[in-house]
Amino acid sequence: MFGFRLQAERPPEPRPVSDGVVMRLDDVYEIDPDRMQIIAQQNMPVSDTLRIVDSRWEHLAWMHDHWADHVLSGEEEEQDE
Amino acid sequence: MSVVALSDSVVDELRAILGSDYVLTNKSSLFNRARVPAPFPVHRWDEHVADIAVLPETAEQVAEVVKLANTYKIPVVPRAGGTGLSDGAVPVTGGILVDVKRMNKILDIDLDDRTVTVQPGINMLKLNEELRRYGVVYPDDPASYPCSLVGGRIGTGGWSLIGARYGHTRDLVISMQVCLPTGELIEVGDGGGRKIRKSSTGFQLKQLFMGHQGSLGITTEATLELVPRPEAEFAAFFGYPDYETAYKSTGALAKSGLASLAGVVLFDEWKVNYLRRDDEAYIPQPPELRCVVAVAAYGTLAETKPASQVIMAIGKETGGNYLGDEVSQGDWASRHDRYATPLHGRTPEGQVVPMSWHCEDAAITYSALPMVREEWHAIAKRYIDDYGVFDDWGMFAYTNGAHKPWGDYLVEIDIGIWEQRLDDAMWEAWVQCKREITEVSLKYGGSITACHGSTREGDAEFVPREMGGGFDVMKKIKRVLDPNNIMNPGKNSLDEAYED
Amino acid sequence: MTGIRESGDRTSVDDGLQTNGQGPDGLTEEFVSEWRDSAYGCFSSGHKFCREVCPVMQVTRNENHTPTAFHANIVAMEKGHLAVEDVAEDYIHCVQCGACELRCPNTLFTGDFYRHRTRTVDVVKAMRALAVDSGVEQPNWKRWVEATMEASNEPVVEGVSQERVRDWAEGLDIPTGGETILFVDCEAAFYRTSVARATAMVLRQAGVEFGLMQEQWCCGGPAAEMGYVEHARTLAEHNLADWRSVGATRVITLDPHDYISFTVDYPNYFGDQYDIEILHITELVAELVREGKLELTQSVERVATYHDACRLNKRKGIYKSPREILHAIPGLTFKDVDHVTQWSYCSGAGGGMRIERPEIADEIARRRMEKAADLEIDTLISACVWSERPLSEQGADREPSIEVRDLMELVADAAGLDYGGVQR
């Protein structure tokens, strides 16, 4: 699914997942909007949220690679990457 | 609009040295070279603005500017990245702000003798991007790695997250060229050889010019270590049900004797609670998890793979619950980014407000860590309750000694400050809070700052007490090297050197 | 949800928020009120992770040009230390690439959690608009925008006019109107027409039906970037009306600058009524190749690297589709540089930089080309026609020279299409 449709950019309503934390998009945690009364939340389209999440993972991978060729695992019975 | 308080002839002389384009007199140039990331008295911004900013390109230009400053007795404030945490680069008495960012060249890469020579305005991440093709790295890795500059690392006596393995800035700088407060350019190193790491010739001058916060001169060139690019990186995060267990585990890991160990970091309960505010980046952990210890190792595969297994064994044997590869690797790679988020600020009612981050740092022995933690949090709580604009973001304890993880710890308490609400009364309260925190460090035989520096109000007044007889030596040196007190005056209580 | 104000998401000062005869002071007050949350979000942090990824900062090394300063100035204006006249010139020094606001930990690590991110591009646009509204104008931007309004298209070459906006399509018999419109950026329509022709022929080859606008005007993006909000809006309103008048529901963009205009600026202008679907060419073509509707059979014997267009990679997170296409081109030796490293790359062509500070834009382009040359390539491929002019100039200057080609030109080559047009 690609392309831009304004209607699809409106984020779904939040559902609570824990104290002070909600979720609108799958696996994307957000603060409960009730906690942002002094500083307002922004109008953030769905594609923007997804871009930030993807960019974060990509940045983390980049930071590992910047420092070393292999990242070793601490989990048992796993070979290093 | 110009706010130059300097005479026109001084400005003309500066233009002759640097070229008009690089002599800045307008307000936005000066107001944007005032603060550093440490909490800033926004309500008194205009008191921390230089009279003029200059952007040199060469060491010779720096020297000419400093000579001119001596002639006219004008203060000089050196500024590299302006990312320090102790106001070293913040003007307090106006003057000429020397901004070295244009001096960001790599001058020489020597793969045989393993050195790289750079100008002070270069950033370590950008330097390492260039060095990668040669299979080497300059492993000075602070939280500000993506933005701090080599000159500032030297000026502040920087600390590296992987210092237990590779050393800190002062261990990684082999030699440098310094512009003295009277304008001479000299070379300092271990002895006189540019690329010599250990010498017994003369006095050990290089360390004198580390961490002086710009009060003894300006670094104009530095020759740095080139280390083989690590084959492997290992990071493990362990969770603990209580502080005591985490504390003992920290000690065991730090004393493991592993050569590739790069650092051990203890997150106390307050820090874990702070990080929980952002569940999304920190995969939700059960409430039984109160403290965390992070361990990192770097080196060849031959060393680091077995070391990783030892680390896992020690962590588990000492009560740690491994949080998994995703958390460990993700959080380690986030080490520069996650710990100073303005929107993690909370009012006592739990509302989000953007807070500035104050990181109060000290060097504390292992045995004193538990008491310092209790006393610091108690101090913070009083100020939070009384003023409503502060927030306790928890404490870290990091292995501190270069190549010596078994020794002392860089201990930090992170306090959020709602800067928009600052006024004189709250600023004074804030400084008083810092003083109380500092007293605790001294009480337990520690140092009031492991790495940020002692230049700020709240720290500077304690420098004579911590240094004892050494403070007299400091004053003598300062007086001799900087007879006109032009080099970053008003820092570290060193104005006292001129009181007759 | 209670108490949600939507702050900082406007790129225009309009809809009744205008002067009311209050003069600059009133305008500044409104501006500061709208942007103070954004300003403090940055100012409270002070961490400057933006600085080294900024293409302008890499060249000028002047703190005045940092995103940090762009935000701090607003706090200083609130405190009465600075006025828009004091800072307007500083804000010229931004290509609006979006690297800073993405790299900022307040976006990258917590922007999604708090639904509050760093928005340097919007801040720069808004400050430029405040400057224009306060009577502080940059001479070359003013001329450029006036010429654009005069000709309805950007003065990318001598003699740009509305009458000639479809000349690039000569001989292609592209209809006017229809459900799907191909929007052909001014630089492609008038300057590097090979890109326009290659794109049109590729779409046709893959069986995509599309038409052109009745009267294609400039998307309005440059005017918006330079602070001429009213003009940007005028252009936008015309374009939307044109699309609607031919029954278009979908617009394909071939340049990232237009994709930004249509997916960021236009929703701000038109709100919920904005029901046009916008597709960017790289995403569409990647799908066509994937689905076998476009076959790339002709070998393209080049050693190439790819320049991530800022407005695709940094601002929109579109970096996979161009690479997918490149990997599908036979015969191509593709030496990639990852898209995160390219957060700090730029051609210098955006944000009006080439128009008001060409020497800085040229140096940004020179450095980009130098990085490409380090890889020992003969071709630099871009997916942004605006980047191609400055990069071509730099590539031609080198010994040996490096050719700059548009991704769609290479796709057309690989599809065996003879597109013609002017390539430069």
Image: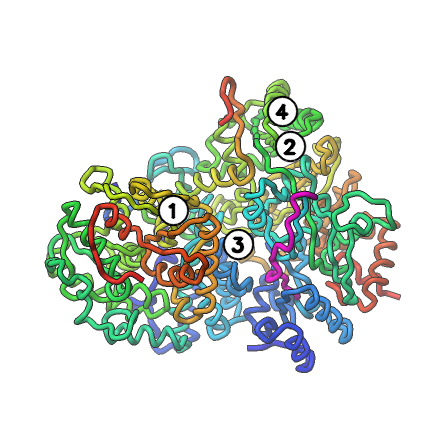
Q: Which residue is mark 1?
A: C303
Q: What is the chain identity of the residue bearing mark 1?
A: C
Q: Is residue C22 magenta?
A: no
Q: Position of residue C40 (x, y in %)?
A: 50, 57
Indicate the secondary structure of the residue bearing disc 4. Answer: helix
* Side of C129 where B150 appears, left or right: right
Q: Which residue is mark 4?
A: B307
- In-front residue for pair B398/C305: C305
In this rendering, which labeled residue sits more in front, label 2 or label 4?
4
Indicate the secondary structure of the residue bearing disc 3. Answer: helix
Residue C91 lies in quadrant: bottom left
* Side of C241 where C85 appears, left or right: right
Indicate the secondary structure of the residue bearing disc 1. Answer: strand
Q: What is the chain identity of the residue bearing mark 4?
A: B
Do callouts 1 and 2 point to residues on the same chain? no
* Side of C186 where C97 appears, left or right: right
On screen, C416 above or below B47? above
Q: Which residue is mark 3?
A: C52
